[in-house]
Amino acid sequence: MTTQARRTADTAGLGRRRFLQAGAGFGALTLTGGLAGRALAQTPALDMWWWGEQELPGLQAYLDKAIAAFDLAQITPMLQDTAVVISQFQTAAAAGNPPDIQYLWNGIYHMESVWLGYLAALSDVMDPGILAASNHGPLSRFDGKVWRMGWYPLPMPWYFNKDLFDRAGLNADAPPATWDGLLAACEALKTAGIEPFGGGVQDGYWAEWYLTHALSQNLDTVGDAVNLFIGDLDFREPRYHQHWVKLAELRDAGFLNKDMASLELYPGIDLCVNGQLGICSSIGTRLPADAITTNGRIGCMTLPVFGVGALAGRPVVDMQGLGISAGSGAPDIAARFLEFLNAPAQLASFWEATGWIPAASGFDDSVISDPSVRDLWTRWGKGNNITNITNLMPGQFYEQAAIPTGQNIITAGMSGEEAGELAARVAQEWRDFNPDLVETYRTWAAELSAG
Amino acid sequence: MRRNSPLVPYLFVLPLAGLLTFVFGLSLVRLVGFSFKQVRGIDGPWIGLRNYELVLGQPLFWEAVRHNIQLFLVIPVMVVIALALALLLYERLPGWRIHRTILFLPYVLAIPIIAVVMKQMFQFSGPVNTVLSALSLDFLVLDWIGSADVALWTVMGLILWRETALGVILFLSRLMALDETLIEAARLDGAGWRHRAWYILIPQMRGVIEFFAVISAITMLSAVFAYVYVIGGGRGGPGTATMVIELYIFNALIRTSLPGVAAAVSVMLFLVSLILIRALFALRRREEE
């Protein structure tokens, strides 16, 4: 019998009883499926837009596990491109279709969305104790509320290569702490045939990081940085462009690596790790890998002090975070998820997947076994740190002054005074272009200065 | 309506015209509208010509304009080189097929790929300077992408290398379409390569040369973003040495949250491009007459 013939015979043999049984079975299946579907439909669906895999490999794996373990909602994550983290969110929020949970960089990078009304105040929806323990930092506060949860910290040390210090006859256990000490160390390194100081400024980030460490040395409060942009303080005053004068001093002394202008940030850091550069600016998330590469011969220090401000010499720690859209349909569930990420088991899972430290105080840091990382975490993460003041810069100032000044000093012979002039002019332009934001910034500065 | 009515052809193109108006026309209207507003998010209050005033009063904008104008210097060089190469290929010198492929290759590759490779090549400690040093040409060892004095010239070199290929393609295809009997007659009359090129071939290529020059001008004005983005570290650097109008617009829109300003500059760029396109049509008309 052929297959076709068998099929015809079977169909013909389907009696009324079998037909009713099959119909009942089908109905039961439909009912069950419908109930299950309804149950699934009742589980809220949240969207989460995030970034960070680029600077913290393993974050995606961690997040996938966390989402799978969270049973109050179905969360759909979407990894964003660096260039559109802010604009994509703001456009979606303005169009009334934002994600429920959004990755947020520090300071102005999320505060602008607060002012536009796109973010919900986390202090209204999250457990206050958990939110405070997330170490969101001062730049997440505005109008007496907290708008962002801390997710993972970014200590910002200066690396020095201990082997090169040894070769130059310097004490690798006592890196320079003062500017004169730095100049002396650079001279010793140069004499030993080692390029002393620098990295890569071609993509601009080195200029930003230099400002982070150096401008803050002549500030008394974080709010002073905002006062420079709104015009209450002036970059043309020597105190507020001394950091650029000091950079020009390093250039004129021949202490900067000769290919600094054509190298990007991370290849510049690699020079120090690979033993070709004495001192460079870096980021803590690199340290676990760099410590292994150098067998622990990378040391961390703060930028040696030249300034007289209250913030001088203090370690810098930036903080990445998460927030909830004002347009979220389920802000309470989103808040539960953020709280869930701060549970001790999740913090341990974060460390396991990324090899890096989560922000929350509930993390058991006794698991950090590498002495270099432990030292960094003790002195930066748990020390008397300050936030990254470049996170207070309006985008226009960042693009048209913060980065060009550093690059022009290094590559085009610009003086520190000229850099101060340029910065003052761009700050004025920002005020002209954004008259509606100046008063909001002034309010923010007052809150930041008041602590 | 009668089939021979003068309106019939317009009815045929009406659907496409409607579609184009919908896709481009509405965007353009919205863009112009934005340029008169202080946009926050996706809309904002009307501020008249303020965005234009701010942009035209900003030194950075004029620096970007100067850089775009400097890029125009590439055009005559590009035309001459493309013309010379096309004429040589047309002569079918030995190995001309492989040379043609090599010349076309840069145009086939995506600009970011080329720019990234070139950026590696032209780093201060990169292969170009290493070779120059090895050849004892140390006076030519420059910080090609790191020096504010040199970076834009490096971008121009890269544009020249890639965009010349388009000229070669256009010129060669025009040459291939010429009537060979005239050229053969000149050859029999004893005209050498130089004379054939100057008196017979180039005069017949005038239209395509003008077309390439105008297209290149539009490119220099509004299609060099990928070059400067990669070579200038994504920011028109070092400093503002490679800032061009397109990057200015990108920064205003994406990095400084000023969509109104970005729209104002886009409108100005659009108008200048329109003038160039009008010039192209005028040239074509003159050619046809």
Image (tube, rainbow, N blue to C red):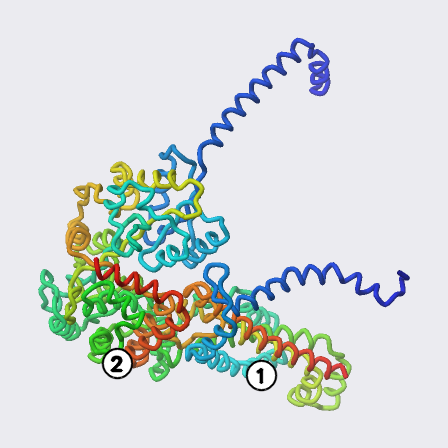
* Residue A136 point in image, percent of width and height: 27, 50
Give residue B173's mark.
none
Q: Is residue B211 left or right of residue A432?
A: right
Residue A200 visible to the viewer: yes
* Residue A301 point in image, percent of width and height: 16, 61
Label 1 and label 2 in one chain: no
**Label 1: which secondary element:** helix
The answer to which of B124 and B230 lies nearer the viewer is B230
In the rendered view, tell whether residue A21 sits above or below residue B81: above
Residue B127 visible to the viewer: no
Q: Chain of mark 2?
A: A
Q: How many marks?
A: 2
- Residue for badge 1: B80
Q: Crowdedness of circle 2 by 10 Å Cα count: few (<14), some, many (20+)? A: some
Q: Is residue B261 left or right of residue B271?
A: left
Measuring 45% from the left and 66% from the top, which residue is drawn there?
A: B258
Give amino acid for label 2: Glu
How far apart in space, not on screen, are marks 1 and 2 (Cα)?
45 Å
**Label 2: which secondary element:** helix
* Residue A401 point in image, percent of width and height: 34, 73
Q: Is residue B10 left or right of residue B96?
A: right
- Residue for badge 2: A417
The answer to which of A231 and A334 lies nearer the viewer is A231
Q: Quadrant of residue A194?
A: bottom left
* Residue A210 point in image, percent of width and height: 25, 68
Give amino acid for label 1: Val
